Image (cartoon, rainbow, N blue to C red):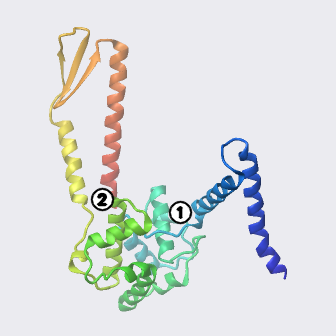
Amino acid sequence: MGDQKSKNKHPSSRKDIEKKLAEQLSGRVDLSPEEIERGVGRFIQRSRESLGGTEIKPPYRRPTWYDTFFNLIHERTISNVSLEFIKHNIISAKSEAYKFKNGLRFLDFIDQRGNSTATLEKLRVTGEDFTRNLAEVIQKAYADLFSTIVVERAKPDSVINYMIERYGYSRPLAEEATVLFVYFCTKANISMSEELKAFRVKTEQRQKKSERVVRKIAKPESRLEPEYDESFATLKFDEFSFAVKKDLAAIKFAKSQINALLDYLTMKLSEEEKDKTR
């Protein structure tokens, strides 16, 4: 009886909150209290989901992170995987460490507190036993994908579109999630189509584009040429031109803006280079 009362307590208290909020807002908007109450209920539900109620999505980013992790669990017993552990042993960037930790949770290697699970313990073996156990893990973690797509005959776009539609990933993230799925299947010796096996994120194309940008920036020397209005000068850079007033304050401001843009591009290219080496 006590358990039943405790179960009913939370819904009624939530309903009371919704009603009180609706009453407070009813005088401020042109809606009925009932409409406001329904809206408040939806808002509370979305808030609960954003705070952890939503399912964990498939991992994406770098297969090399998981190679490193598998090597670590073969070298020693790991009982807890914290962000600090990940930052010191797998990937130093905090935002990337979060992504990797969520990937471990998706695979059921750790629980919400980072404690290792029985699933992870099964992967401490090596050789064929490791391959067989990993196959069981992947089949279970990606069960919905395997029940939706016949991976033995699938094209890469089938898996990419599945990641987009099922989990709301953008195209680039869906591609990275697909690459990681292919990586796990390959490591676990799970049958896939040849097209899927050969799929890689188009990092080569992105890299070539970055190199073209660098070459374009470094290619011509900028030159200052006077225009018909003697109070202005034009800075020409390849096909790009920038007019600046011949005023010390204006020139300093223009210089700060251009330097900020170049610093941003330099930082982004440096991050891409670091990611490729990990």
Determine the secondary structure under disc 2: helix
**Earlier residue among tags 2 and 1:** 1
Q: Residue at x 77, y 66 (%)?
A: 12
Q: Is residue 151 visible?
A: yes
Q: Residue at x 51, y 83 (%)?
A: 119
Q: Which residue is mark 1?
A: 83
Q: Quadrant of the C terminus?
A: bottom left
Within 10 Å of disc 2 (Cα), the crowding (few <14, some 14-19, many 20+) is few
Out of 54 and 132, give the one closest to the viewer: 54
Three-letter residue code for mark 1: Leu
Q: Is residue 87 visible?
A: no
Q: Which residue is mark 2?
A: 276
Three-letter residue code for mark 2: Lys
- Residue 204, horizontal then vertical, whole percent: 21, 58
- Residue 109, horizontal then vertical, whole percent: 50, 77
Q: Find the residue positioned furthest to the right.
A: 2
Out of 276 and 236, give the one closest to the viewer: 236
Out of 195 and 161, give the one closest to the viewer: 161
Whether residue 67 is situated above or below residue 37 in the rendered picture:
below
Whether residue 266 is situated above or below residue 194 in the rendered picture:
above
Q: Residue at x 72, y 57 (%)?
A: 18
Out of 230 and 159, give the one closest to the viewer: 159
Q: Quadrant of the N terminus?
A: bottom right
Determine the secondary structure under disc 1: helix
* Number of numbered discs on residues: 2
Q: Find the residue positioned furthest to the top.
A: 230
- Residue 117, horizontal then vertical, whole percent: 55, 80
Which quadrant of the figure has residue 15?
bottom right
Within 10 Å of disc 1 (Cα), the crowding (few <14, some 14-19, many 20+) is many
Which quadrant of the figure has residue 43?
bottom right
- Residue 128, horizontal then vertical, whole percent: 35, 91
